[in-house]
């Protein structure tokens, strides 16, 4: 297939890779109904005690309404709960449930296998360089 000038565009090349990577991600995490935003939220919540929804939205770089949707879906799955904040009585704190902590362990293993699979043709140095270069774009 001749893609013409598309092959010379960084954004187009990234998007094609992202589509393939995203599908592999969904296949690997199908058992847990986890999407990339849900996984990101779980990891951030797990590593930041007493986090508020607005803080999660900022950390993920999404609108508050998007964070509400992600947290609500994780609550329905039984992975996240909202509790009274010990820091701000007007807000709720986010926390992984016991089931969420257990699930995150298995999800993390599946993500690591996914990451190894999608980057298998790259050396360790090339993976580091790719992460570095992508960091320059964002």
Image (spheres, rainbow, N blue to C red):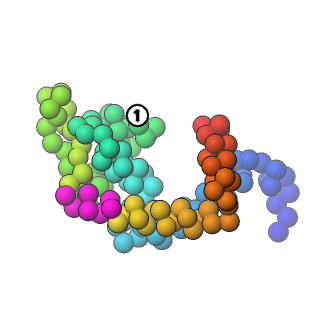
Q: Residue at x 68, y 65 (%)?
A: 121
Answer with the quarter of the image where residue 75 lies. Answer: bottom left
Q: Is residue 72 left or right of residue 117?
A: left
Q: Residue at x 77, y 48 (%)?
A: 9
Residue 105 position in % (x across, y down): 33, 62
**Magenta-tinted stretch:** 98-105
Quadrant location, the C terminus: top right
Q: Residue at x 49, y 67 (%)?
A: 113
Up-down: is 134 above or below 90? Answer: below
Quadrant location, the N terminus: bottom right
* Numbered disc 1: secondary structure: helix
Q: Is residue 49 left or right of residue 9?
A: left
Q: Is residue 6 left or right of residue 48?
A: right
> Relative to the observer, which residue lies in front, 55 or 44?
44
Residue 29 position in % (x across, y down): 42, 67
**Neighbour tally class for label 1: few under 14, some 14-19, many 20 plus, Cα within 10 Å:** few
């Amino acid at each position: 297939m001749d893609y013409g000038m598309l092959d010379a565009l960084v954004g187009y090349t990234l998007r094609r890779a992202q589509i393939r990577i995203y599908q592999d991600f969904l296949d690997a995490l199908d058992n847990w109904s986890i999407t990339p935003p849900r996984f990101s939220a779980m990891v951030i919540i797990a590593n930041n005690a007493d986090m508020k929804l607005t803080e999660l939205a900022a950390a993920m770089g999404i609108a508050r309404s998007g964070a509400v949707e992600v947290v609500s879906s994780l609550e329905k799955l039984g992975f996240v709960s909202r509790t009274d904040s010990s820091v701000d009585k007007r807000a709720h704190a986010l926390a992984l449930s016991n089931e969420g902590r257990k699930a995150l362990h298995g999800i993390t293993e599946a993500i690591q296998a996914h990451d190894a699979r999608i980057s298998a043709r790259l050396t360790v140095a090339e993976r580091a360089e790719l992460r570095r270069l992508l960091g320059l774009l964002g």
